[in-house]
Image (cartoon, rainbow, N blue to C red):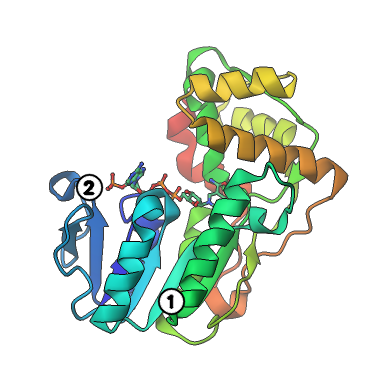
Amino acid sequence: MHLITGATGNVGRHIVEGLLAAGAGVRASSRNPATAELPAGVDIVASQTDSPAFAGVVGAFLNPAAVHDTADRLLAQASAAGVRRIVLLSSSSVLDDHPDNHTGIAHRDLEQRIERSGLEWTFLRAGMFAANTRQWAARIRADHIIHAAYTSAAIAPIHERDLAAAAVRALLTDDLLHQSPVLTGPELITQADQAKLIGDIIGKPVRLEETDARTAREHMIAQRMPPEIADSLLRYYERAITQPIEPTPISTDLTRQQPRTYRQWVLEHAADFR
Ligand SMILES: NC(=O)c1ccc[n+]([C@@H]2O[C@H](COP(=O)([O-])OP(=O)(O)OC[C@H]3O[C@@H](n4cnc5c(N)ncnc54)[C@H](OP(=O)(O)O)[C@@H]3O)[C@@H](O)[C@H]2O)c1
């Protein structure tokens, strides 16, 4: 049995699918088990409960979005229940040592707590998610005009299914044991080209207007993005200009699949932008 936190989210749903496909038992935690809509056969538990979600669990996937301030309690419960391994959805921002890099500092702090727990671990240090461009969906649907800063910064967005595939490998095999790979998509692309690609695929041109970082931040927050996430994304783009990103996709040996491109992600999510 494996416990997946954040199981209803971008990455978590694909981990659940991947584990079930591999024949593994899955327990999933959600704040709203009744509306979680997870596949049959998944044992769904309420994330807020103190009940022993770890009974019979050998490996757990921790998503900081879902566990943030409960991480210490979860790690203590996991150790006490005999869980062997923690796979953390971490962030490549841990490698940015700027003092204002709050997201990176928070993820590194979580990594260190896990190291101290004595449990086996894998830290999946994800780069920018392809799914982040969903922040543009409402504006593209409304008037096809979006705003962004650092539009020429080239990033290598990762498809959430590839991250999930890496998490499944890390839970079910020793291939990534005590490793902290930086994971990106396979290809560099600028925000300008991401917007153009979305327009090409939905059949209506998308106009990307370059703004300063402050205005871009306001637009992101207006799309209900938490301010700390907006800050972290802007910092990532700014840094990509001075320190170009080298794509480090998950190896096909691990996932048995070619890493998915941003184009594939848009084709799968085109309906969100129409
Ligand atoms: N976005 C990026 O570019 C990026 C890059 C590197 C690393 N990351 C890491 O990836 C995480 C996001 O992963 P994701 O996109 O798969 O997550 P997500 O879809 O945003 O959230 C996963 C699940 O967590 C639960 N959740 C969300 N907000 C919560 C809250 N405030 N309190 C408790 N539970 C909450 C929700 O499940 P229920 O409603 O079912 O409880 C949600 O479905 C980030 O937090 C960061 O740690 C992101």
The disc placed on residue 31 is: 2
Q: Which mark is residue 117?
A: 1
**Is residue 26 rendered to the left or right of residue 144?**
left
What residue occupies the far top of the structure in this picture? 143
Q: Quadrant of residue 199?
A: top right
Give, as a three-letter code, the residue at label 1: Ser
The x, y position of residue 28, in whole percent, is 25, 62
Ligand 1 within 8 Å of the CB at mark 2: yes
Occupied quadrant, residue 81: bottom left
Picture residue at 40% right of the left edge, 79% below the top: 85
Image position, residue 43 (x, y; %): 16, 65
Question: What is the distance, in whole Å, between disc 1 and disc 2 at their CAs?
Answer: 25 Å
Give the side of residue 234 with respect to residue 244, left or right: left
* Closer-to-camera residue (184/68): 68
In this view, the residue in front, 10 or 39, is 10
State the image coordinates of residue 33 (x, y, percent, origin top left): 16, 50
First in residue order: circle 1 vs circle 2: 2
Q: Position of residue 138 (x, y in %)?
A: 47, 22
